[in-house]
Every structure is written in structure tokens, then in C-alpha cells.
Image (spheres, helix red, strand yellow):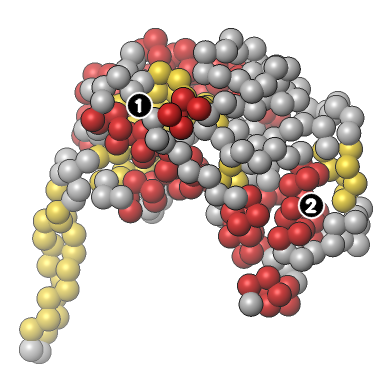
């Protein structure tokens, strides 16, 4: 599997056409992406691939046909895939990221977010691969932002606790690994429910029905392609400098509540927003959320790493395929 693979090419000769299997020349730098079928994983895979990396993606439920199906809870399968591919870098995007699901399925979430992450770190260490573990701003309680990498975490919900335990498992099993904490994500979704930002689009579009929107929790929506760029830049810097390791933060820099995001989405598509109602009370249902877990990103910025897509531009790119009233496309894009 390392370095060369087979590819099919069509050979034409007068009177016939045949398929020939030939060696394919692949880039020498190899990266393995877990959770490559997810919103962030797809962006990470695309970013490395277009920058001359041999990218290998694995997923679980949605893996076939583009990616390899791997159960990260199967330590033997993980061992074989890593030792066969011999990646220089592993970007670990796979996780149970929905706080309310984690509360309801704590054991399954802990197995994926903690146990599988620790095992992956161990396997990466055995072959000298640089592991980037994707973590979350939810490791903080949101009472004293902005948070630097060395600030003491204090997660409010089980999701934040599993991500923090995952960080510890990774760094204990692999001293050269990196932890990248990120906030709420959006991007080119396959369905609106894939992101807590894009899922609001239907409420924005159905303006004949009033919709309550959270106006309490302060968020920093971040485009997945920006996180993907940070992962690649971090990996490339690490290949030149082994001191690149430990914990890092990356985030968009536009502070918004979900109500403000929804209004910005409406504005981007020239849609009405008067039906959206801001709710300023702390949410009482579901897992507890931090009020403001803003991440200080100066550590990565000092390294010359980072990219930020303005929310209005990024959200328009992400959501226009889901625009119900096609007439609006004329005013938005022409």
C-alpha cells in the first residue's frame, strides 16, 4: 500500500480498446484521516489531497465506496490499517460530537472519544507518525474567556469531559502528538443537520412561522476548510520542526449567538428575519453548555498558521444548494 498503487488506464489501438492496470505514482507524504466521511473529515481529506499529499480516509457507516471502512473500536483493524499505510501524519476527526447524544449514550461515546483515541495515539507512536487529535472548546466552562492552551479545563457536560479525557489519553500514549481544540463548525454539508449552524436554515427560510433562537450562548462559527488548512499547515511545520506538539487552539473570530447567526444567514440570502425571536434565557433542556468558551488562537498565529473565512461568505457558499425559493438565487448570485 505504501507509495504506489494500481490505476486503470484506457489504451486505444486501431480496431480495439482495452483497460490496462499500471503503477500509479503517488505523493511521498502520507496522511491518514479518521472520520473522513464527516463534515470536518471531508474537508481535511480534500485539503491534504489538493496540496500534494497521499491522503487515505477511513470512516464507518458512510465509508464505502470512497473511503476505507474501519471500526476504530477494533484495535486489530486499526493496527493493520496504520502499519499497512505507514502514514507520516494522522488527523483524528472521528468522534461523537453531539452533546445530547453523549449524555444519552455515555459508554459508546467514551469508547470512541477516549478509548479509540488513546489506542490510535499508541499506534501512531509505534511508527513515528504525527497525530493531530481534534478536540473542542467545550473542555472549558465558559466563565472566563478567552481561553489559552495552558488554562485549566473544566467541562460542564459529558461531551466536554470525554473530549478532555481523550486529550489526556492521546498525550499520555504519544508524547509527540498534538491536540487541536476548535469551536462550532459549519461548511459544505451533505444535509443541513450535519452542522449546528446550517441546521438553522429551514427555520430561517420558513418565515411564515415564528422561530425561537438562542441569544444566550456566545459562539464563534468556524469554517471546516479553515480548520483543514490549519491541520495541513501544522503537519507540514511539524515535518520540519519536531518541537511542534502539544495543545493548540483555532477558531473563527466573529462572535455570535445562534440568533445572530440566523439573522446573518437571512441577510446573506436577502431573506426576512422578523420571524426569528431571540431567547436570552439560559437553555434548560439538554446538556449544559458553556456561556462563552472563546479560544485564544495567538499560539498558532505566532507560528504563521491560520486561515479565516468571513462568516457571510462561508455560509453563503455552504447553504445555497439548500435554498428552497430558487428565485432568490437570482438576487444573491447575479
Disc 2 crowd, CA 10 A, few/some/many (<14, 14-19, 20+): some
Q: Which mark is residue 131?
A: 1
Residue closest to the far left: 14
Query: Disc 2 or disc 1, which is closer to the eye?
Result: 2
For the N terminus, the image quarter is: top left
Q: Which residue is mark 2?
A: 263
Q: On residue 191, which mark appears?
A: none
Residue 21 image position (x, y, % from top left): 13, 62
Q: Residue at x 39, y 30 (%)?
A: 303
Check contact, mark 2 vs mark 1: CB within 8 A: no
Q: Residues within 10 Å of mark 1 (few under 14, many from 20)?
A: many
**Depth order, front residue of 164/102:** 164
Q: CA distance from mark 2 to mark 1?
A: 38 Å
Q: Is residue 79 left or right of residue 305?
A: left
Residue 61 seen in the figure: no
On the rendered structure, is 211 left or right of 41?
right
Amino acid at each position: 500500500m505504501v507509495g504506489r498503487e494500481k490505476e486503470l488506464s484506457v489504451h486505444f489501438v486501431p480496431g480495439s480498446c482495452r483497460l490496462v492496470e499500471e503503477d500509479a505514482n503517488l505523493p511521498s507524504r502520507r496522511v491518514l484521516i479518521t472520520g473522513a466521511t464527516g463534515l470536518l473529515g471531508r474537508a481535511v481529506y480534500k485539503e491534504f489531497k489538493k496540496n500534494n499529499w497521499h491522503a487515505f480516509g477511513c470512516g464507518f457507516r458512510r465509508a464505502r465506496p470512497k473511503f476505507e471502512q474501519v471500526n476504530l473500536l477494533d484495535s486489530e483493524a486499526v493496527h493493520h490499517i496504520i502499519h499497512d499505510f505507514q502514514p507520516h501524519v494522522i488527523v483524528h476527526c472521528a468522534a461523537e460530537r453531539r452533546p445530547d447524544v453523549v449524555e444519552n449514550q455515555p459508554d459508546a461515546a467514551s469508547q470512541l472519544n477516549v478509548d479509540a483515541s488513546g489506542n490510535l495515539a499508541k499506534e501512531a507512536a509505534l511508527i513515528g507518525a504525527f497525530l493531530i487529535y481534534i478536540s473542542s472548546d467545550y473542555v472549558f466552562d465558559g466563565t472566563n474567556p478567552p481561553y489559552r492552551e495552558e488554562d485549566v479545563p473544566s467541562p460542564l457536560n459529558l461531551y466536554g469531559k470525554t473530549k478532555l479525557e481523550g486529550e489526556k489519553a492521546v498525550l499520555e500514549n504519544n508524547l509527540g502528538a498534538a491536540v487541536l481544540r476548535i469551536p462550532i463548525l459549519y461548511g459544505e454539508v451533505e444535509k443541513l443537520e450535519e452542522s449546528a449552524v446550517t441546521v438553522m436554515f429551514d427555520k430561517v427560510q420558513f418565515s411564515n412561522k415564528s422561530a425561537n433562537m438562542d441569544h444566550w450562548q456566545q459562539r464563534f462559527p468556524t469554517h471546516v476548510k479553515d480548520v483543514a488548512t490549519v491541520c495541513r499547515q501544522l503537519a507540514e511545520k511539524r515535518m520540519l520542526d519536531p518541537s511542534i506538539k502539544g495543545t493548540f487552539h483555532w477558531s473563527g473570530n466573529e462572535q455570535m449567538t445562534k440568533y445572530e447567526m440566523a439573522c446573518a444567514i437571512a441577510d446573506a440570502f436577502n431573506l426576512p428575519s422578523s420571524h426569528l425571536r431571540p431567547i436570552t434565557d439560559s437553555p434548560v433542556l439538554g446538556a449544559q453548555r458553556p456561556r462563552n468558551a472563546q479560544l485564544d488562537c495567538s499560539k498558532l498565529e505566532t507560528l504563521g498558521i491560520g486561515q479565516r473565512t468571513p462568516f457571510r461568505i462561508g455560509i453563503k457558499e455552504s447553504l445555497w444548494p439548500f435554498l428552497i425559493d430558487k428565485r432568490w438565487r437570482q438576487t444573491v448570485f447575479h
